[in-house]
Amino acid sequence: MFWYSCPALLKQYFDDVLTYGFAYGSKGKALADKTFALAISLGAREGDFQGKFSLESVLTPLGPSATSSAPSMQHHF
């Protein structure tokens, strides 16, 4: 995790790989039988993220990216 988001290179990877016609859409079946999980490294304990900036709320934007291309999303670890 980098300033409550993903690093720029990871964002670029998502933009390049999770494309219409490959990862999702009517012909996008490349990730159809895959499972998505987040492995996150933090400089604090998960319990230190509370309230408005809980870990779940910080990771919320990554959920739709995963579920639009992979049918199954596992809990972060």
Image (cartoon, rainbow, N blue to C red):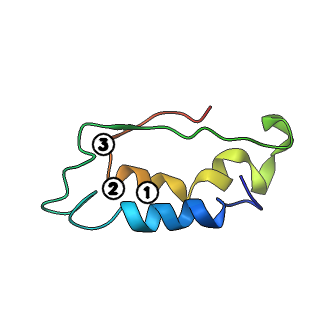
Residue type, mark 1 in image: Pro
Observer-nearest residue: 22 or 62?
Answer: 22
Residue type, mark 2 in image: Ser
**Dot label at residue 71:** 3
What residue is shown at x 77% (from left), y 55% (from top)? 53
What residue is shown at x 48% (from left), y 52% (from top)? 63
Earlier in the chain: of badge 1 and badge 3, it is 1
For disc 2, the neighbor class at 10 Å (few under 14, some 14 to 19, many from 20) is some
For disc 1, the neighbor class at 10 Å (few under 14, some 14 to 19, many from 20) is few
Mark 1, residue position: 64
Q: Secondary structure at mark 1?
A: helix
Q: Is residue 32 above or below residue 16?
A: above
What residue is shown at x 43% (from left), y 58% (from top)? 65
Which residue is at the far left? 27
Observer-nearest residue: 37 or 48?
Answer: 37
For disc 3, the neighbor class at 10 Å (few under 14, some 14 to 19, many from 20) is few
What is the spatial separation of the Cα atoms under label 3 and label 2, in whole angstroms? 7 Å
- Name the image quarter holding residue 47: top right
Image coordinates for residue 42, horizontal then vertical, percent = 78, 43
**Dot label at residue 68:** 2
